[in-house]
């Protein structure tokens, strides 16, 4: 592994203090493929580079899986499936619990690795580690509680035995914006249910997934049960695996267009499919909202992770009678956010993932301004190195602006005003997406009434962050299919088997 990134820009007190830790962390991070319990180079020796988006420097060179590697990983996952499915649930539970404990011990390593390759501030990265670890603990607990039922049929002619069986080998494809949590949210329930897995992390952030894979090996995951295939070209890996009839499930988190492609490919083998896709979350502030809560919630829902979250509040819909005050307070809070390298102390907003992402955000803002929106705060890309965009607040944004219709994935908050509850609901629902939504009101009956009318899988009522390992996470409409987390999360990796028995009472 190269350690070029330890040559970070000075003056940087944090990096000076932690230089040796970062060097040793990068040295300890695997950079090969994990297939059948063995770290291997790609069959053709190909590699790709991983960059630090805060500095533009190369962090590491990672093996890039080929079609042949994908076939080997599929063989390993298929070969291990039966024996893994037959292990007692307590055995699988103990491995996941050990993994949770190890993650606690290595938490700071994971946080720094996430910040290094993805850019989010260290405080956000620590939050992701806590959130991501909880999936290991939650599913270690769920593994032993995957109950079926044994009941008489209504006519009394049969005994009905219903059990849940692991669905079989799974392909797990994850995005770059939460490189640890999106992996644990899939790997933990799959392993708990008794499924073997092939994890394909995002090209931009494979290091966290590889470090996590080593942790799982250390926790005792048997060979073949977790295979990890970083790749420069995702389809080169996913296509042969999806074509293989031994694969039984795909779980994908990423953009809607790629999700649609993968669903089409999955249909050839009638694969179980879980799709966690894009969002265009509304955050509604009613005239009776507590504005302190609404501003704090909006900052969290919009600016956490630099706005690069599928749950991000994409559109701030504010009642016209409180719009000026909300905008003033929100603008003041935005001006307080410090932008910089996420490894430094006190940083609230890190870089975007790459130049393309930064330029896409700049394009959305330019389009909104062209259509009449006014920039209250920010509105510009910041000088490099790194791919920074200033936290931005736009007002008077017309409904046809792209920033209202598309997923922004950046620290840009467009405010739109409304005058009635019906109008707010209609505006909120006028999107093909349906993942997260947020409502701020002090009237609980209004909150519940509006929540019934919002076409979204998730709703935050007077809060801006709602993700939790114990909650069923997922969307409706083009935001996806299935749920991750909660008791629902393990059900995604099981199929239901019914046995009809002769009744003892006949
Ligand atoms: P992406 O769709 O570009 O990539 C996601 C993953 O799919 C990556 O591992 C990528 O390498 C892989 N991939 C890309 N093209 C592929 C192909 N043709 N075949 C197989 N795999 C392919 O998304 P991204 O840019 O990494 O992530 C951002 C998107 O993810 C946003 O739209 C965001 O809303 C969404 N997201 C959704 C959730 C959720 O839970 N709903 C969570 C996080 C991110």
Image (cartoon, rainbow, N blue to C red):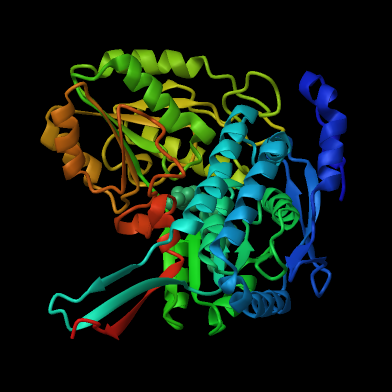
Judge from the rendering whether residue 120 lies leftward or rightward of residue 485; answer left or right. right
Question: In the image shown, does 187 or 173 lie closer to the viewer?
Answer: 187
Residue 375 in view, yes or no? no
Q: At which x and y percent is residue 155?
A: 12, 79
Displayed quadrant of residue 319: top left
Q: At which x and y percent is residue 105?
A: 71, 37
Displayed quadrant of residue 152: bottom left
Residue 135 in view, yes or no? yes
**Which residue does the image show at 25% across and 19% down from the upper left?**
323
**Which residue does the image show at 46% across and 44% down from the upper left?**
469
Q: At which x and y percent is residue 307?
A: 48, 36
Judge from the rendering whether residue 212 lies leftward or rightward of residue 370; answer left or right. right
Question: In the image shown, does 333 or 141 lie closer to the viewer?
Answer: 141
- In the rendered view, tell whether residue 268 sits above or below residue 172: below
Seen from this angle, which residue lies furthest front?
A: 505
**Which residue does the image show at 57% across and 56% down from the upper left?**
93
- In the rendered view, tell whether residue 11 sits above or below residue 230: above
Judge from the rendering whether residue 398 lies leftward or rightward of residue 83; answer left or right. left
Quarter of the C terminus within the rendering: bottom left
- In the rendered view, tell whether residue 378 sits above or below residue 151: above
Displayed quadrant of residue 425: top left
């Amino acid at each position: 592994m190269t350690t070029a990134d330890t040559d970070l820009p000075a003056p940087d007190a944090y990096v000076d203090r932690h230089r040796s830790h970062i060097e040793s962390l990068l040295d300890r991070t695997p950079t090969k493929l994990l297939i059948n319990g063995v770290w291997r180079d790609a069959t053709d020796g190909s590699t790709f580079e991983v960059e630090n988006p805060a500095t533009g420097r190369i962090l590491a060179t990672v093996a890039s899986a080929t079609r042949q590697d994908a076939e080997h990983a599929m063989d390993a996952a298929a070969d291990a499936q039966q024996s893994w499915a037959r292990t007692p649930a307590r055995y699988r539970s103990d491995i996941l619990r050990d993994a949770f404990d190890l993650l606690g011990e290595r938490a700071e390593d994971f946080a720094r690795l996430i910040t290094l390759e993805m850019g989010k501030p260290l405080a956000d990265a620590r939050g992701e580690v806590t959130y991501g670890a909880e999936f290991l603990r939650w599913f270690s607990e769920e593994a032993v509680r995957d109950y079926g039922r044994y009941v008489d049929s209504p006519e009394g002619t049969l005994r009905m035995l219903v059990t849940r069986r692991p669905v079989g080998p799974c392909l797990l494809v994850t995005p770059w914006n939460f490189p640890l949590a999106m992996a644990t949210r899939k790997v933990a329930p799959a392993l708990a249910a008794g499924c073997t897995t092939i994890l394909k992390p995002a090209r931009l952030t494979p290091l966290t997934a590889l470090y996590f894979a080593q942790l799982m090996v250390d926790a005792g995951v048997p060979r073949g049960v977790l295979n990890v295939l970083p790749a420069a070209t995702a389809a080169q890996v996913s296509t042969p695996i999806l074509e293989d009839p031994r694969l039984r499930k795909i779980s994908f988190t990423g953009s809607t267009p790629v999700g649609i492609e993968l669903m089409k490919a999955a249909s050839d083998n009638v694969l179980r499919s879980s799709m966690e896709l894009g969002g265009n979350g509304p955050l509604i502030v009613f005239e009776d909202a507590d504005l302190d809560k609404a501003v704090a919630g909006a900052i969290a829902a919009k600016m956490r992770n630099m706005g690069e979250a599928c749950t991000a509040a994409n559109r701030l819909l504010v009642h016209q009678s409180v719009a000026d005050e909300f905008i003033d307070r929100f603008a003041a809070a935005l001006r307080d956010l410090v932008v910089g390298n996420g490894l430094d102390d006190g940083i609230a907003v890190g870089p975007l993932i790459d130049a393309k992402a930064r330029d896409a955000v700049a394009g959305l803002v330019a389009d909104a301004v062209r259509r009449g929106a006014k920039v209250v705060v920010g509105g510009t890309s910041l000088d490099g190195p790194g791919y920074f965009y200033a936290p931005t607040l736009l007002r008077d944004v017309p409904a046809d602006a792209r920033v209202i219709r598309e997923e922004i994935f950046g620290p840009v908050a467009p405010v739109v005003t409304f005058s009635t509850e019906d109008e707010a609901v209609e505006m909120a629902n006028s999107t093909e997406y349906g993942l997260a939504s947020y409502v701020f009101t002090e009237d609980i009956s209004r909150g519940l009434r509006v929540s019934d009318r919002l076409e979204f899988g998730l709703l935050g009522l007077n809060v801006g962050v709602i993700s939790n390992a114990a909650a069923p996470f997922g969307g409706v409409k083009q935001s996806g299919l299935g749920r991750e987390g909660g008791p629902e999360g393990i059900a995604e990796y099981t199929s239901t088997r019914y046995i009809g028995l002769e009744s003892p009472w006949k």
